[in-house]
Each structure stands twice: as structure tokens, then as C-alpha cells.
């Protein structure tokens, strides 16, 4: 009985500081990269919009941002795969994925519905007397991208929450 | 009390199975070690198939591994 109590106490201490699984490391890195890279991109766009200065090469900056994120993701995932043997997803991983995808889908729908609403207002469909929105095609693309990024962030945060707090 | 209303004796059964490691049990069931930890802590209720596999790994009936303690909302 004493031996069992000792083993259980050691386990309890160890499990409280449960090391991160391959899936969690992969998600956390992806989340950090997404927030930092797109945070920098949208922060820069917002600053220029507030200053009233048009971007010189907006499409090139967007494509450069996407290329940077893909590069960081690929390098990080390779490093994680080398450091921590990739484990196939089990039933708990799949359950967490399902909940995270549900939340992300909700955010994506709200974001895209908001964008569609803005387009309708910009086109004067809802009320011609409303002030026109300066909605350029590139701004629409940025808004759609922002909705995708928000959905991705919500998915990653949901996954990390359920991995830590339990399902 | 677990978060799911399902209690289990996996830690005790591992001890009686020669201090079977969580990793060894995880490999027998086909899940990750983190999933075994989550089940032991009551943070995750396994599927019926995984529950039977756990019971089989210890050579005991299912009800000796898992017990359901219904909460007040289920009454």
C-alpha cells in the first residue's frame, strides 16, 4: 500500500507537469507563427491606413508574408518531427480536432458574412443613402484573409485548451 | 471526483500489473501516452472500444476499471 501511494504521488506530480505531445507542440508553434507573422502584416497595413499613405507594393507584401509563414511552418514542423517522434492521431486527438474545427467554422462564417455585408453596403444594395465604403478588391481579399486567420487562431487555441483542460 | 463523472482504477491496476508504464499501456491500446494520462486524471472518457482494450490489457472486466458516478443533473 505504501509503495502504491509513493508511486501514485510521483505520478501525480509528473502528470501535473505533463509534457507536451507532438500534436500540442505542432499546434503551439503553428499558432505562434501565425499570430506573429500575420500580426506584423495586418499591423503594418493598419498603420499605413491610419497614416493615409497607400502601400507601395501591397500584393508583393502579402505574398511575401504568406511565403514567410510557409517557410517558418515547414522548418518548425521538421524540427519538431526530429525532436519528438511524430505520433499518429488517436481518438482523443480526433475528438479535439472536431471541436476545434466546429469553433473555427463558426468564426469563419461570421467573418465572411460580415465581409459580404460590407460588400453589399459598398455597392449601395442595402441603402443608397449610406456613405460609400472604400472597399477595394484588395481590401476585400485582406478581409477574407483576416477571417481565415481568425478561424485558424480559434482552431489552434481551442485545441490547446482541450489538450490542457481535458475533453 | 473526475471531470467526466467516470472514475477509473487504471493507476491502481497498472501498479498491480508490475508497475506497467503509461507508455506501455498506451502502446497496447493504440493511443498516445498523453491520452492515458488524461484518462487516468478523468479529463477524457475513452471510447467503448478503448475502454474494453484497457480492461483486456489488465485481464479484468470493464466494470472493474471504470465506474460511472452520475451527477445530480442526470437524476
Image (cartoon, helix red, strand yellow):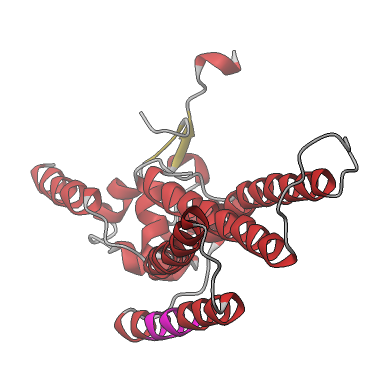
- Left/right placement of residue A40 relative to residue A109 reads left
Q: Which residues are magenta?
A: A70-78
Q: Is residue A125 above or below residue B6?
A: below
Q: Is residue A158 above or below residue A93?
A: above
What type of secondary structure mainly makes up the magenta span? helix
Q: Is residue A33 above or below residue A49?
A: below
Front in this rendered view, residue A44 or B16: A44
Image quadrant of residue B74? top right
Q: Residue furthest front?
A: A52
Q: What residue is shown at x 44% (from left), y 58% (from top)?
A: A47
Image quadrant of residue A32? bottom left
- Left/right placement of residue A111 relative to residue B71 reads right
Q: What residue is shown at x 85% (from left), y 34% (from top)?
A: A129
Please check the rendered image and state whether residue A146 is part of the magenta-colored stretch, yes or no: no
Please check the rendered image and state whether residue A77 is part of the magenta-colored stretch, yes or no: yes
- Percent position of residue B51, x then y: 52, 51
- Percent position of residue B68, x then y: 50, 31
Q: What residue is shown at x 63% (from left), y 63% (from top)?
A: A142
- Percent position of residue A161, x then y: 43, 47
Q: Quadrant of the N terminus of chain B?
A: top left
Amino acid at each position: 500500500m505504501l509503495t502504491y501511494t509513493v508511486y501514485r504521488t510521483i505520478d501525480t506530480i509528473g502528470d501535473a507537469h505533463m509534457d507536451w505531445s507532438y500534436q500540442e507542440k505542432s499546434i503551439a508553434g503553428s499558432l505562434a507563427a501565425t499570430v506573429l507573422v500575420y500580426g506584423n502584416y495586418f499591423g503594418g497595413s493598419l498603420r499605413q491606413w491610419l497614416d493615409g499613405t497607400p502601400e507601395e507594393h501591397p500584393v508583393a507584401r502579402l505574398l511575401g508574408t504568406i511565403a514567410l509563414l510557409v517557410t517558418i511552418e515547414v522548418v518548425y514542423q521538421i524540427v519538431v518531427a526530429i525532436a519528438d517522434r511524430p505520433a499518429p492521431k488517436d481518438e482523443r486527438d480526433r475528438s479535439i480536432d472536431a471541436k476545434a474545427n466546429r469553433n473555427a467554422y463558426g468564426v469563419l462564417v461570421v467573418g465572411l458574412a460580415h465581409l459580404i455585408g460590407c460588400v453589399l453596403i459598398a455597392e449601395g444594395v442595402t441603402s443608397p443613402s449610406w456613405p460609400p465604403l472604400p472597399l477595394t478588391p484588395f481590401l476585400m481579399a485582406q478581409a477574407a484573409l483576416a477571417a481565415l486567420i481568425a478561424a485558424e487562431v480559434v482552431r489552434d487555441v481551442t485545441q490547446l485548451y482541450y489538450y490542457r483542460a481535458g475533453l | 471526483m473526475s471531470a467526466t463523472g467516470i472514475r477509473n482504477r487504471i493507476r491502481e491496476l497498472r501498479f498491480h500489473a508490475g508497475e506497467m508504464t503509461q507508455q506501455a499501456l498506451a502502446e497496447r491500446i493504440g493511443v498516445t501516452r498523453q491520452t492515458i494520462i488524461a484518462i487516468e486524471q478523468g479529463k477524457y472518457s475513452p471510447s467503448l472500444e478503448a475502454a474494453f482494450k484497457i480492461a483486456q490489457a489488465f485481464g479484468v472486466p470493464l466494470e472493474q476499471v471504470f465506474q460511472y458516478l452520475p451527477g445530480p443533473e442526470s437524476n
